[in-house]
């Protein structure tokens, strides 16, 4: 009871002393409620909801197949979804329950990052730069929806916090954060864990050059590689373990990058009256199939607004005139498909914003440069016509450019502190490089690539805070 009381007291102190945290939580809860059962912004969310609803004694013996949790250990899923399950037992809708978990993890990520380099002489948290970054529109969206992005962000924050604690001498704290964070990341997205391990091996090579204490090197190997692997193997299924081994040792990454990034949906639409295929009786409508390439968000939004006229989201969209605009775009797209010989609506794939991406070749390192730049900088505003949703998200790209510029400015401003000799600067740089390079090799769809970019926010914020803390260390 004392521990519960202390946790409650700490939580109350965080929210009362930091109004930005309160603003973050309230705005995210508000938008989670407004969206309702709309999955247009992340169609995969419906699959995660299916997994959640069938994880605790559902009819499907393997509900993980419906989502990205396919290789996650069931004990891990039982634990992370337990708060959401309790909320559903209290009458909270299932979709809202898993979104509340995402919001809680997003909040935990902000608090973790803000406390990593907290000044011992200052009681406040450095929330302003973190708070602003987490309100980049796409980041705000991913930390609302019941996807894995919030989990990954929180896990990376735990790993970086553990690394910091290790080099600050807090061995027990470092061990707990590193083991739990790495096990969770391995359970959540195994290929990101593989990137992390490869980054660690490169990092350890530099630590050896810098004559770092060998005990730290062994501690990192044990807490990042050995123990999480043992814990994962002991809690997951034989299928998941085999899948991970195959993915690690036998996957041809060139073949992975050769996947078709096209998103194809066949939609039945009313035939235009008076056409040769149309019905002569106006009371008997005829239909034809139009094939959409891309524009999944537009399609799902159109049908949601049509099928849920009384929902809070639809009413809000009607109020601001968004519904009529979506209908106008929809009719334009359908008409274009109906008059084409192939009955297809094809989005632009030729420009730099083409929604089908060309991946790099690991045997030609220079080929990674173009997809890496697209991953970091794209999609570009007012270029091409990759689809309605991508046109909108392109408007936030300048915010990412500003974030990169701010971090670069930090490096230039504090270059006299020999930043590249600091292990706590070196590791997140290597990790960022690994994530970007891997994305350049495997991302074949612009929308998916855009969503996956959210994970680099955590190491970027960590680097910004670490470089800022170097100035205070030097001043002290």
Image (cartoon, helix red, strand yellow):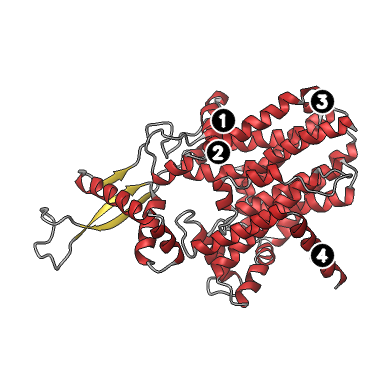
Task: Tell me which residue sits at (64%, 55%) in the image.
Answer: 24
For marks 2 and 3, give the CA distance.
Answer: 38 Å
Q: Which residue is mark 1?
A: 362
Q: Which residue is mark 4?
A: 9
Marked residue nearer the N-terminal end (4 or 1)? 4
Mark 2: few, some, or many residues within 10 Å (few <14, many ≥20)?
Answer: some
Marked residue nearer the N-terminal end (2 or 3)? 2
Of the pair 102 and 133, the residue shown nearer to us: 133
Q: Quadrant of the N terminus?
A: bottom right
For marks 4 and 3, give the CA distance.
Answer: 39 Å
Marked residue nearer the N-terminal end (3 or 1)? 1
Residue 32 sits above or below residue 457 on the image: below
Mark 3: few, some, or many residues within 10 Å (few <14, many ≥20)?
Answer: some
Task: Tell me which residue sits at (40%, 47%) in the image.
Answer: 263
Q: Secondary structure at mark 4?
A: helix
Tags 4 and 2 touching, CB below 8 Å: no
Q: Secondary structure at mark 2?
A: helix
Q: Which residue is mark 3?
A: 417
Residue 253: numbered disc: 2
For marks 4 and 2, give the CA distance.
Answer: 49 Å
Marked residue nearer the N-terminal end (4 or 3)? 4
Answer with left or right where residue 121 lies relative to residue 462. Answer: right
Tags 1 and 2 touching, CB below 8 Å: yes
For marks 1 and 2, give the CA distance.
Answer: 8 Å
**Residue 8 on image: x %, y %:** 79, 66
Answer with left or right where residue 117 lies relative to residue 74. Answer: right
**Residue 423 on image: x %, y %:** 80, 33
Task: Tell me which residue sits at (56%, 74%) in the image.
Answer: 58
């Amino acid at each position: 009871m004392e521990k519960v009381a202390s946790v409650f007291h700490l939580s109350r102190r965080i929210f009362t002393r930091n109004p930005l945290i309160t603003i973050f939580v309230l705005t995210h809860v508000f938008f989670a409620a407004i969206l309702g059962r709309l999955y247009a912004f992340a169609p995969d969310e419906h699959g995660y909801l299916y997994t959640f609803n069938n994880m605790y004694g559902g009819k499907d013996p393997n509900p993980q197949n419906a989502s990205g949790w396919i290789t996650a250990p069931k004990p891990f899923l039982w634990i992370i979804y337990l708060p959401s399950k309790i909320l559903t037992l209290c009458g909270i809708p299932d979709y809202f329950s898993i979104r509340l978990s995402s919001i809680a993890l997003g909040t935990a990520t902000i608090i973790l990052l803000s406390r990593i380099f907290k000044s011992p002489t200052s009681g406040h948290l450095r929330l302003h730069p973190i708070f602003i970054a987490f309100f980049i529109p796409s980041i705000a969206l991913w930390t609302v929806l019941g996807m894995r992005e919030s989990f990954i962000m929180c896990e990376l924050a735990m790993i970086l916090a553990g690394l910091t604690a290790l080099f600050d001498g807090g061995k027990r704290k470092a061990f707990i954060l590193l083991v739990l964070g790495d096990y969770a990341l391995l359970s959540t997205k195994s290929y990101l864990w593989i990137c992390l391990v490869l980054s660690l091996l490169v990092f350890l090579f530099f630590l050896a050059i810098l004559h770092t204490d060998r005990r730290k090197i062994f501690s990192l190997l044990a807490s990042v590689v050995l123990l999480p692997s043992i814990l994962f193997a002991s809690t997951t299924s034989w299928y998941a373990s085999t899948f991970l081994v195959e993915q690690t040792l036998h996957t041809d990454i060139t073949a992975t990058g050769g996947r078709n990034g096209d998103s194809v949906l066949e939609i039945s639409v009313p035939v235009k009256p008076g056409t040769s295929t149309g019905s002569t009786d106006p009371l008997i409508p005829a239909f034809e199939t139009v094939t959409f390439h891309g524009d999944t968000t537009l399609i799902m939004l159109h049908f949601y607004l049509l099928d849920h006229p009384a929902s809070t989201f639809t009413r809000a969209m009607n109020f601001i005139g968004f519904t009529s605009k979506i209908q106008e775009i929809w009719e334009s797209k359908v008409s274009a498909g109906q008059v084409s010989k192939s009955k297809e609506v094809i989005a632009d794939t030729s420009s730099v914003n083409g929604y089908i991406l060309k991946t790099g070749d690991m045997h030609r390192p220079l080929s990674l440069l173009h997809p890496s730049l697209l991953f970091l900088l794209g999609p570009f505003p007012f270029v091409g016509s990759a689809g309605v949703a991508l046109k909108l998200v392109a408007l936030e790209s300048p915010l990412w450019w500003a974030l990169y510029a701010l971090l670069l400015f930090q490096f230039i401003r504090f270059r006299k502190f020999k930043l590249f000799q600091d292990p706590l600067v070196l590791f997140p740089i290597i990790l960022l490089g690994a994530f970007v390079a891997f994305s350049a090799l495997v991302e074949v769809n612009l929308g998916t690539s855009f969503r996956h970019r959210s994970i680099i926010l955590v190491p970027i914020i960590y680097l910004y805070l670490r470089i800022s803390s170097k100035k205070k260390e030097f001043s002290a």
